Image (spheres, grey):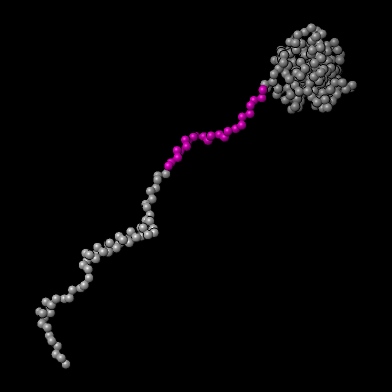
Amino acid sequence: MMEEIEIPEAIRENAELPQKTGLPLPLLTSGVLLLGILGFISLRFLGGSKPAEPLVSNPPVESPSPVSKSEPEPAPTAVTPPAPAPIDLLGHLPYDVAPVSELIPVTADGRIKMRPAAANKFLQMQAAARAEGITLTALSGFRDVAIQEQLFFGIKEQRVQDAVKRAEVSAPPGYSEHHTGYAIDIGDANAPETNLETSFGDTAAFRWLEQNALKYSFELSFPPNNKQGVSYEPWHWRFVGDIDSLETFYKVRN
């Protein structure tokens, strides 16, 4: 066995250690940094994903707030234009002519006719008056325009009256209540001389009508000093006992 050569401790402590090979640390660090930059540039230009840009959020545009109202605005409604006011002629109002097929007679000979509701009530009224000794005579009921034309223009010429004077006692054609089938001229059979005269107002028949006609829905059309300016006609009565007759005579005035 070879003897182990002992190196003195002082020599061992002062002996130089072999130096490691490689690049100095500053140069190595610079190289790593350069590689990093080159890699970033490669990713940038060779299809790498573009780094997301920070989103800049625009402030929301606020719409002007509606003006508060104390009450909700009502929905628009259709406006119906008012009906034109009826045009009177010499104090008389226009009336439609009743269909002849709807009329029934109030006299035995069938000459004088009225609408059914008016005719039935007149016959009841006539019977009630007869039971008290009063005989009501039907003088005239429905008239068409041709008959009214003769009564207005024909008699106007016979009496040499102007239109205004004639209109005081007779309506122009198209403006007579007799067209409606609801009007009737009444006389007193016990005083025929008063027929269609203001003196009829002094008869027993007229006094009975004043007290009882409304029970049968008949009313005096042209009392003294009436608004239409028509002369007083105590013999002329009209029926207003159903909705059609009521509208015929009162709706046209409103």
Q: 240 or 32: which is nearer to us?
A: 32
The answer to whether residue 142 shows anywhere in this view is yes
Examine the rendered structure and indicate whether residue 171 appears above or below residue 40.
above
Across and down, in percent, residue 19 comes to 18, 73
Q: 21 or 199: which is nearer to us?
A: 21
The quarter of the image holding the N terminus is bottom left
The quarter of the image holding the C terminus is top right
**209 relative to 30 in the view: left or right:** right
Q: Residue at x 37, y 52 (%)?
A: 53
Q: Residue at x 13, y 77 (%)?
A: 15
Q: Residue at x 10, y 82 (%)?
A: 8
Across and down, in percent, residue 66 comes to 47, 37
Q: Residue furthest right?
A: 109
**Magenta stretch encompasses residue 83:** yes
Q: 195 or 90: which is nearer to us?
A: 90
Q: Residue at x 53, y 34 (%)?
A: 73
The answer to whether residue 182 shows anywhere in this view is no
Q: Quadrant of residue 152?
A: top right
Q: Which residues are magenta?
A: 61-84
Q: Residue furthest top?
A: 160
Across and down, in percent, residue 139 comes to 84, 17
Q: Identify the main secondary structure in magenta.
A: loop
Examine the rendered structure and indicate whether residue 63 appears above or below residue 216.
below
**110 relative to 86 in the view: left or right:** right
Q: Quadrant of residue 85?
A: top right
**Magenta stretch encompasses residue 93:** no
